[in-house]
Amino acid sequence: MIPSPRVLLARARHAQVLPFTAAALLFALAAVLPPLPVPGRSYHHLIVLDITQSMNTLDYEIDGKPVSRLAYAKRSLAASLRSLPCGSSVGWGVFNEYRLLALMTPVEVCGNYHELLATLSNINGQMAWAGASEVSKGLFSSIRALKAMEPAPTLVFITDGQESPPLHPTMRPTFDGEPGLVKGLIVGTGGDTLSPIPKFDPDGRPLGYWKADEVAQTDSATRGRHGTSDRTENMVDENGRAITRSVASGTEHLSSLKAPHLKDLAAQTGLEYRALRAPEDLARALQNPAFSRTQSVPTRLGWIPALLGLLCLAWAYRPDAWRRSRAD
Amino acid sequence: MTGWTLGLWPGAIEFTTPLWLLAAPLALLPLWPRRRHALDYGCVDWLPHDRLGDLLLLAGRVAAALAMLAAVLGLSGLGQPATEVQRTGRGAEIVIVLDRSRSMDEALVPKGRQPAIDTTHESKGKVARRLLGEFAARRPEDRYALLLFSTSPLPIVPFTQHGDVVQAAIEAGGIGRGLSETDIGRALLAGAEQFERRAYSGSRILLLVSDGAAQMDPEIRERIARALTRNRIAVYWVFIRSALSLGLDADESDNVPEAALHRFLQSTGVPYQAFEAEDPEAVEQAVAEVDRQQNLPLDYAERIPRRDLSTWCFVVALAAGALALAIRLITRPAWKQELQS
């Protein structure tokens, strides 16, 4: 009743049986194929949020309600984390005064998503340990700190670029590192027009808005040794030349996105610059191929033979109508 | 492509790539009535009705349909979603309150040695981070929260069982120099308040890691003592001695802030113990102490990782496909060709 092996083999290779043979072999392959290392892209970011008071400025909107720059940045970050491929890692830091405070070195995003969000939600203006906001120095020192990390993550520096006290037009902190050694991105937050900056006490209670006479309106070089000597005395630079006094704008208590300043900082340090207009901007910017690292990720590939096997069977049982029209 | 989860009895199932399910109707193809199995044979009356053959052919078609369906399910990434199961183990909930003030950047000078400009000693912060890292690694079942403090308390990680997150927060303390001030009073209060409005599950520990203290006014002492007692928190202080410090047992008349804090914590009535970090066995001691004291039943959520079932789908596809093939092989597919061959 059962044909001989020779006949069976001949039948197995027969045009009508061949799809079945192939399908069985492909399904067997799909079932036994172990996960294979396939190179995949991953990202390793240390995300630093500016938590100075200007970041409380309400010039963004979520669902029609005005929200602060910090709240909008946090909301965009939470959405962006979801879109990073698994195996990527993210850490947090905050910027205030003139320096970075790292809160968490990068950890894997998919497994620790809720933990990363919990730490992100803890980040707020009350974390600030000083009142100043020296963005340039903060950025430069962050780059130095990241360079020392092994392996160095990408720096994502989220700020509005508002320097307080303001910078002198020529006497500015300069970047002394090697541009581009630490890769990264400056994300500019804030609106195009000047808005008042809400004022809070150290416990986060609102105190209205900052007024013109409550913030430094001129840079420290122009102010000179205020109070200690003659107010007409001019400061000199390292070569002994008198420093030209800058003219105070009188608007330092108001804030907008300082895009030219941030672009200049980005050019000096070899970072990218992107203004935050929509949460998707950030998600896309975080997945800039220039920031990616290629690493082997064990990947299940069983689906490929399984799909081919499925197509074999579908071919074997293709509808008669199609079969006849082809035969004709 | 996003996953798709179905809540089905007895447990949920999940598809990682549900779009493949659109291919499921392909599995109906083998069951479609067709004429192609009608053999070209001159006189059907000669043949008896082959019941077994009919049955075999039907079984083959069903097997093929089953194989295709299983393959589609496998392609769409069938699996059981990750779940959390509430379990009760033994352990503690630990709030780490870590000093991030500038003084922690100084070298830890062994007892009795003169402080010198000496880079051979590890900084106090580094010692603290190493000790904490070891501690957290030694007690992985515990739940940890981490709070930095300097001028103000900075809550970093709320309670979590993810060891790598805790280690990452400890490690981050090593980036950049310390901040300026030390407000230990507000830090202790913030640490104690982490337990506020939290169901009591397992022993509660506040692990203070600091190199010194500051004088605290009676009001904040009172608030700290109340918060510790109310939330039933045990306090462990890993004290990292500064050079020239008189230590925790200094006389009250010497007006040493760390000794004052030591006495205050002893007076709160909650379980309290101090460990001196320069002692190489400090971690061992601390772990042993926590092991001995703090192993009340701890309710914790055990995370059951996602179970992928696609490989099993492919195994089913293989079995059913092999059956379909076997039936094909033992039946004559097409009389004519076989005769010719």
Image: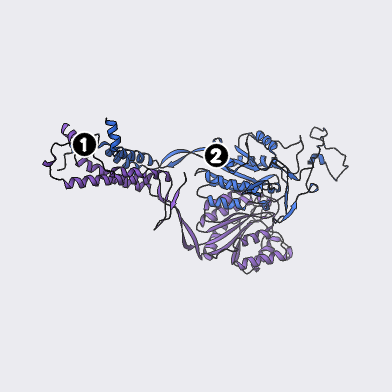
Chain colours: A blue, B purple
Residue at mark 1:
A11
| Front position in the image: B29 or A247 | B29
Q: Is residue A57 left or right of residue B32?
A: right
Instruction: Please rate how many residues cluster around mark 2, counting C-alpha atoms within 10 Å: few if below 14, some from 14 to 19, many from 20.
Output: some
Question: Left or right of B196: which side holds B308?
Answer: left
Asked whether A165 or B295 is in front, the reply is A165
What secondary structure is marked by label 1? helix
Q: Is residue A286 visible?
A: yes
Mark 1 is surrounded, within 10 Å at the Cα level, by few (under 14), some (14 to 19) or many (20 or more) other residues, namely: many
Q: Amino acid at mark 2?
A: Gln
* Residue B174 visible somewhere in the drawing: no
Count the labels in the image. 2
The amino acid type, in three-letter code, at marker 1 is Arg
Numbered circle sitting on residue A287: 2
Picture coordinates of residue B64, whole percent (x, y): 28, 44
Q: Position of residue B222 (x, y in %)?
A: 68, 67
Q: Chain of mark 1?
A: A
Check the residue under mark 2 and report the chain it is in: A
Task: Residue B119 in the image: state x and y as whole percent.
Answer: 65, 46
Q: Nearer the viewer, residue B222 or A303?
A: A303
- In the image, residue B114 lies at what x, y percent? 68, 52
